[in-house]
Image (cartoon, coloured by chain):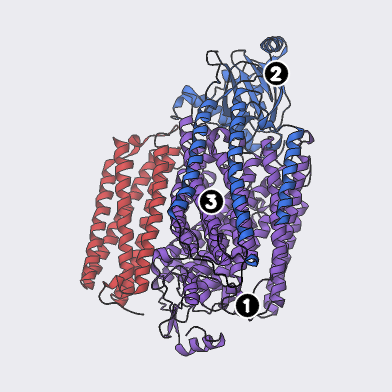
Chain colours: A blue, B red, C purple
Amino acid sequence: MKRKWTLLAFIFTIVTVLTGCEPLLVLDPKGPQAATTANVIWISIITMAVIVIVVIVMLTNMLLKYRASKQPDDYEPPHIKGNPIVEGIIVGVPILIVAFLSVVSVISTYQVEATPEGYEDQEPLVIYASSSNWKWHFSYPEQDIETVNYLFLPTNQAIEFRLYSHGTISSFWIPQLAGQKYAMADMVNTLHVVADVPGEYIGRNANFNGEGFAENKFNVTAMPQEEFDQWVDDIQATAEPITEEIFDELIEPGHLGQMTFTGTHLDFAPAPEGENGGHNHGSPADSDEDNSEQEQETGYNESDHHNH
Amino acid sequence: MKIDSTQPLEYSTEQNRLNILGFWIFLGAEIMLFATLFTSYFVYENRTGSGPGGADIFEITPVLIETILLLTSSFTIGLAIHAMRIQRTKAMLGFFAITLVLGAAFLGVEIYEFIHYYHVGATLQTSAFTGILLTTLGTHGAHVMFGLFWGIFIFIQIKKQGLTPQTANKSFIFSLYWHFLDVMWIFIFSFIYLKGMM
Amino acid sequence: MEFFERFAIPHPSPMIYASMVAIGLVTIAIIVGISYFKKWGYLWNEWLTTTDHKRIGIMYIISALLMLFRGGADAVMMRLQTAVPENTFLDAQHYNEVFTTHGVVMIFFMAMAFIIGLMNYIIPLQIGARDVAFPRLNALSFWLYFAGAMLFNISFVIGGSPDAGWTNYYPLASTDFSTSVGVNYYNWALQISGIGTLMSGINFITTIIKMRAPGMTLMKMPMFVWSALITNIIIVFAFPVLTIALLMGTFDRQFGTFFFASENGGMDMMWANLFWIWGHPEVYILILPAFGIYSQIIATFSERNLYGYTSMVVSMVAISLLSFLVWVHHFFTMGHDAMTNSIFSITTMAIAVPTGIKIFNWLLTMWKGKIRFTTPMLYSIAFIPLFTIGGVTGVMLAIASADYQYHNTMFLVAHFHNVIIPGVVFAMIAGLIYWWPKMFGFMLNEKIGKWAFWFIVVGFCFSFFPMYITGLDGQARRMYTYSEATGFGPLSMLSFFGASLLAAGFAIIVYNIYYSFRNAPRNIGDDPWNARSLEWATHNPVPEYNFAVTPEVVSSEALWDAKKRGHNLFKDKIEKIHMPNNTGWPIIMAGLFFVFGFSFVFFIWAGVILSGLAILGCMAYRSFEKDDGRYISVEEIKETEDKFGGANE
């Protein structure tokens, strides 16, 4: 048993050293949503640590006290059927713990699914984040600009991401700002985000989607509103407009660096929401989208999948 | 082999009793299989894409004929088992044969129905709805088809060997299977056809 | 595509060519070896056509061990590839195939086979039966599983392995994004072995309900039998869902339907739902028998009865019901409303309650006991804290809001390995060592066994605990590489080190089998562990007919009653025993299923039709076949019993 304790101590040291050096991304939130999840994670870690410690203490106690070498040779362990009080405790205490965590879970789940507290009366900035193999396309309909693989956000501003995919299921994740959510081809998911602190953050697709998955990431820069407006103006002045031809090329499988356009692809290839949604009824209204998808697919099959 | 003569023939040996229980459990699995198909059907029911919906393609006449054929065959297999219980081999074989003929007729009408769907442009590749419709009906139809072959084999065995604990056991299990297919058809009739035509 | 081109590997590498050559050479060596030693007849008569539950059980376990090494090799390759940043040992496509096959092989062909193997060997013995209810069906179950496993394993030399993850989410798994035949293999291999598993489930439920020894009421069954009963009920209700999901996937890929497509009414989420409606109960199919094994081992080596028998049973029933109500927690992030996520979050956490009861019952079983630290007991002791850690991280994952941060990360990978390895794998090793003398009549060496134990436990901790940390640091799972800037390097290296220790541990177990086979004494008697339940009341290794006389029991600890309370287990006189005959049809039919599956994978319709007809032909033949089995005479039984010392009369 000694070896095991040394081992546990060793692992514990590693954990503390590593967490001490540099805070883990998920536990180093830069926005209210990520802060909520980080708090929940800490609450659950502490609660659960208590359980683990209780179990380990009980186990150690049993092993030290009741091992055969400590007992007389003629010791015959008794036949013990069970005891209603003991069984009440081992049922009751877990129920209390689970009830507590259920409350935490429900409250926090409602929190992260809504606009963060204090930002409710703001008009949220809507950004469409759509994935294609293996890129992210960010459309800012209000600003009428589009970027690829990078994201600029104003700080202290409620942002509503609308997520969808041009193919496989991807998962939009900026660990320091909020938890992830899937982007899928036939529906739009919403993710509420606020960045409190200006800075550069890592964003990525967390859901495996094929060969280029490992590199399927993007950069996030959060900056004060004035800088953000400045950035938008710069793009309007310098970038080229996005067209259907350019966009069709962009969503071909492969990797691209960061790119910037004026206009958004939503004008000619709308997101699968509202009357364009594939989710409710496959009404003929979305024939436009069907066509573009069809084209994309044929192009896909003809070119060699792994040739990029 | 110990034969317990206080029990009906199909229950008379230990292995027979095991077979019957095992088959009931198998039917439990079959219920899950069809439940999954029905659930999927309900999910895809309105997801017709560019293809037709249920009300556009369902025809009441063949469906009613199929229903009557299968319900009657379920009744006749019941009669066959009753005849078996009172040791009337000839009557049993007669009802058994009627059951199989009705089953074959059912299958024939179902094939006609499938051809009809093909002609009105509802194939597996039309939409998710037509896909799940044909898969569900096809799974049931394949079960009936399998049952027909199985039933013919049992029929021949009774003809050759008479009613023994083995053949009685097989016939009884076959009747369970056949009733089960009937029950599944009642679900298909109510929740796919009637609901779709309403 | 040209006909022959589709058989080629889409991403050849020297390693795959080397494996092809190795597979070819090993196959030739086996064939030559068997022919040289003239063992074909023995192999066919004694093993390939057997209907004896004990031999089928052993064949399951051997296959499971082979698959353990296949899946283990995949695991070591993954850890090696990610041990340092920007490694180039595997490319992305190859890595994707490796983690896909690792998952599938370990879950379906290793863990499932291992538990079914142990159930096969032990369940009839623990309930005092001569065999399972349907011995031929049992053989067919095994051979279908084996055909499925082989079909899956040839994918990496013929046509390419599946590459969409073991969860095989659409649309990634559709022909648009996964262009090789890999996912076809996935569909057919799982379909074929799934049919085998379903039939095993039916077989065991019937056996346990109908064939228990006189006196063994339901509440007097050994705990492993209870766990097996509940497990098999879950199998019967869960596997048909997988059958339909795989069928729909096959239709999408091979007949152009739109079930999981993004157009024409298709719905990619449907696959995820169906898969996990089967998949979550599957988790309990694996863990419940493990719970049963631990219950037996902990009671035996604490020399105490199992604490809280009734609550153990009730908690397993509760787990089995809840297991069908939690599947959405596998995709909280799919965009359900907060209400749906909250409900499934609560049902998921509720499972912690019955599981907690079990943990405390095991602890209380040791209380006032007389604990012997044998190898099986060491695994059971290590299981308790390690599984608790895995369980509580499961509760953490069940909190929907927090899951948005854990989902798809190494934290999740750490969690499920943390429940599966100490939960299922430790139980299998412990069960194998515990019941080894039952199967082969000699014990495995304890000293070497303990070395293996320490390697495996320490290796496990080093492999998976670092993943909790990198997961919280934002490392997504299934990434074939990462940059140095992410800082995942050192912990990943530690994880690779742990994986090497684990591999060494398993190698030591293999060496132990070899060593003990050569050196262990054979005169171990009938009860080498001072055990409690009925399977130890017969000889080691078990004679063909299991018990010369059907035992009569009065409690779940039949042997203990006989040893300590003078209960007479064997009251009747020896009578002739009815046994099933061997049959070649199961292996032939499974071979045809293999051809059927293989042909379907490659759209070879002639092969599909011919093998399909041949399968129906086999069934027809089977329907007409008359086979009443055979009898073992009283003299023969007495002779065998005398050879064992005639203890049982």
Q: Secondary structure at mark 3?
A: helix
Q: Secondary structure at mark 1?
A: helix
* Residue A219 percent location from the top left of the image: 71, 25
Residue C40, numbered circle: 1
Residue named by callout 3: C283
On screen, residue C416 above or below C407: below
Q: Residues within 10 Å of mark 1 (few under 14, many from 20)?
A: some
Indicate the quadrant containing the N terminus of chain A: top left, top right, bottom left or bottom right. Answer: bottom right
Give me the C-alpha separation between circle 2 and circle 1: 74 Å
Same-chain status of marks 2 and 1: no
Q: Give the residue type that dot 3 points to.
A: Val
Give me the C-alpha separation between circle 1 and circle 3: 39 Å
Q: Residues within 10 Å of mark 3 (few under 14, many from 20)?
A: some
Q: Nearer the viewer, residue C641 or C588?
A: C641
Residue A61, numbered circle: none
* Residue C544 percent location from the top left of the image: 52, 79
Q: Give the residue type that dot 1 points to.
A: Trp
Q: Is residue A189 left or right of residue C451?
A: left
Q: Nearer the viewer, residue C438 or C536?
A: C536
Q: Is residue C441 left or right of residue C11?
A: left
- Look at the numbered discs 3 and 2 and tell me whether their residues touch, using CB distance below 8 Å: no
Q: Is residue C633 left or right of residue B152?
A: right
* Residue C343 percent location from the top left of the image: 46, 36
Q: Residue at x 47, y 82 (%)?
A: C548
Q: Residue at x 27, y 53 (%)?
A: B70
Residue named by callout 2: A198
User: Is residue B76 at least partly visible in the picture?
Assistant: yes
Which chain is home to disc 2?
A: A
* Front of the two marks 1 and 3: 3
Q: Give the residue type that dot 2 points to.
A: Pro
Same-chain status of marks 1 and 3: yes
